């Protein structure tokens, strides 16, 4: 069931984005009285799962879930249907319209994607606010594993800045470190600045997804029902002070001590309950857990937004997501970090989906992926929207349109580039699956 929900979540997100993106092309084309011959969700190479002729447009669903398209009359696109181009231009064809109208049609898809993300982020900020942990006010510093130590970080550090820019949200710190060149921390009262080595980033990309966390005092938030802690009488608000006589200062130390015990072993936990010391005997579960969740509410803050304030805040969030995506190319094409090996295709993205339905994740991922779709489609690669925009800008600046032969060859080159990139991401997905069984 979990895998089914992951697949359905991904397919629904892709379907919404593709349909809205293609409507971004379809609507201005109709507005300028250009004939749209096909409107397809997914690709219908050789055959389609569903199709219906409505007016002059064939609406359908293809079988290959790698995107979608609108086929606009009188336009050289990835279909490479050039027979129509051999005839005299018709008034209702794309090639017969002024360059500025054709430019609007080609920019329509990415425009819709950008505004969709803006609307979603604004709606989320208005309805739930922005809850985060301030990076510069962690009471007890960060918590890092061996990957974090390779980068130069130490447990207890307080991150002050990355590339000289003050770190605001702890949730952004991991990506900022990955994309940054140097980091400034407070370590035992001293301010230190050191470079972030590309070799460390390589390990971070391949195996360091959870390399950075934060230390917290071992306060109990809640206990799992019918767990050892719950049955022993441990309550919310209790402060763990020792386990089997060994002092505990932070919740991470508590978790580390728990690893040394056996399944269903009996242990003693000392706690401080409103200034009163108590000790409880409890039995661990079969997976060696006591059933205790830590309290992190004292670290989180929430910025609330009214309807008017949420609009510029949503715009800023969209721009930040876009900027971060552009910055990621810095590590993708870096030979030392080998970031290209971590690029995920459809299979890898499905694995990122939650195994249970999560509306918060759904809307956030939909907005993020909408920005990504807008950015990728604007790349100046023939066969993508950005390639068509590139040729149109050339025509508008030079005063003459590229020849049909140039456009045809451009589409072929662009198709080869896109297929090559898809082969890389699918190859990464397949290789990652194979590695799990090696």
Image (cartoon, helix red, strand yellow):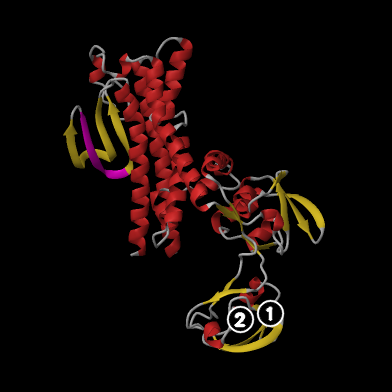
- Magenta-drawn segment: 57-65
354 to the left or right of 143: left
Q: Is residue 101 visible?
A: yes
Query: Which residue is disc 1 drawn over?
Result: 274
Q: Position of residue 308 (x, y in %)?
A: 53, 40
Residue in the image at 44% along x and 28% along y: 386
Q: Which of the image's four quarters has the C terminus?
A: bottom left
Q: Position of residue 294 (x, y in %)?
A: 59, 71
Which numbered disc flags the more N-terminal residue, 2 or 1? Answer: 2
Q: CA distance from mark 2 to mark 1?
A: 29 Å
> Mark 2 and 1 residues: CB-CB less than 8 Å, in contact?
no
Q: In terms of depth relative to the viewer, which is nearer, 136 or 42?
A: 136
Query: Which residue is disc 2 drawn over?
Result: 260
Residue in the image at 66% along x and 55% along y: 134
Q: Is residue 382 visible?
A: no
Q: Crowding at label 1, few (<14), some or many (≥20) Cα neighbours within 10 Å?
A: few
Q: In terms of depth relative to the viewer, which is nearer, 194 or 277?
A: 277
186 to the left or right of 51: right
Q: What secondary structure predominates along the stretch shown in magenta? A: strand
Asked if residue 149 is positioned above or below residue 231 in the image, the reply reads above
Q: In terms of depth relative to the viewer, which is nearer, 309 or 232?
A: 309
Residue 367 in magenta stretch: no
Task: Identify the element where label 1 is drawn.
Answer: loop
Q: Position of residue 303 (x, y in %)?
A: 60, 51
Task: Identify the element where label 2 is drawn.
Answer: loop
Instruction: Tell which residue pokes out farthest to the right in this image.
Output: 190
């Amino acid at each position: 069931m979990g895998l089914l929900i992951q697949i359905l979540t991904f397919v629904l997100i892709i379907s919404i984005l593709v349909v809205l993106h293609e409507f971004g092309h379809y609507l201005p084309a109709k507005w300028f009285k250009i004939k749209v011959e096909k409107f397809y969700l997914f690709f219908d190479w050789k055959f389609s799962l569903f199709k219906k002729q409505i007016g002059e447009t064939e609406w359908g669903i293809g079988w290959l879930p790698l995107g979608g398209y609108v086929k606009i009359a009188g336009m050289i696109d990835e279909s490479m249907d050039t027979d129509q181009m051999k005839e005299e231009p018709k008034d209702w064809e794309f090639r017969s319209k002024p360059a500025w109208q054709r430019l609007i049609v080609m920019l329509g898809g990415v425009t819709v994607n950008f505004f969709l993300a803006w609307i979603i982020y604004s709606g989320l900020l208005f309805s739930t606010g922005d809850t985060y942990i301030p990076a510069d006010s962690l009471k007890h510093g960060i918590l890092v594993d061996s990957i974090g130590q390779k980068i130069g970080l130490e447990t207890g550090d307080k991150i002050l800045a990355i590339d000289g820019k003050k770190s605001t949200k702890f949730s952004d710190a991991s990506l900022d470190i990955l994309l940054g060149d140097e980091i400034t921390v407070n370590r035992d009262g001293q301010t230190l600045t050191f470079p972030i080595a590309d070799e460390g980033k390589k390990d971070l990309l391949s195996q360091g997804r959870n390399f950075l966390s934060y230390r917290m005092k071992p306060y109990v938030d809640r206990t799992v029902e019918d767990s050892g802690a719950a049955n022993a009488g441990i309550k919310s608000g209790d402060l763990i002070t020792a386990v089997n006589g060994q002092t505990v200062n932070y919740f991470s130390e508590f978790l580390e001590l728990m690893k040394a015990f056996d399944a269903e072993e009996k242990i003693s936990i000392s706690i401080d309950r409103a200034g009163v010391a108590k000790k409880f005997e409890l039995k661990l579960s079969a997976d060696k857990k006591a059933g205790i969740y830590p309290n992190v509410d004292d670290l989180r803050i929430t910025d609330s937004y009214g309807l008017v304030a949420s609009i510029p805040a949503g715009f800023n969030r969209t721009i930040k997501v876009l900027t971060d995506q552009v910055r990621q190319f810095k590590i993708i094409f870096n030979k030392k970090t080998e970031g290209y090996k971590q690029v995920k295709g459809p299979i890898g993205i499905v694995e990122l989906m939650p195994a249970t339905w999560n509306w918060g994740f759904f809307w956030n991922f939909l907005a993020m992926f909408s920005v990504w779709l807008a950015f990728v489609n604007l790349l100046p690669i023939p066969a993508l929207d950005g390639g068509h925009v590139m040729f149109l800008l050339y025509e508008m600046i030079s005063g003459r349109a590229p020849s049909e032969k140039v456009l045809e060859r451009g589409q072929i080159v662009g198709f080869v580039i896109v297929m090559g990139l898809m082969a890389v991401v699918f190859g990464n997905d397949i290789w990652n699956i194979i590695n799990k069984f090696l």
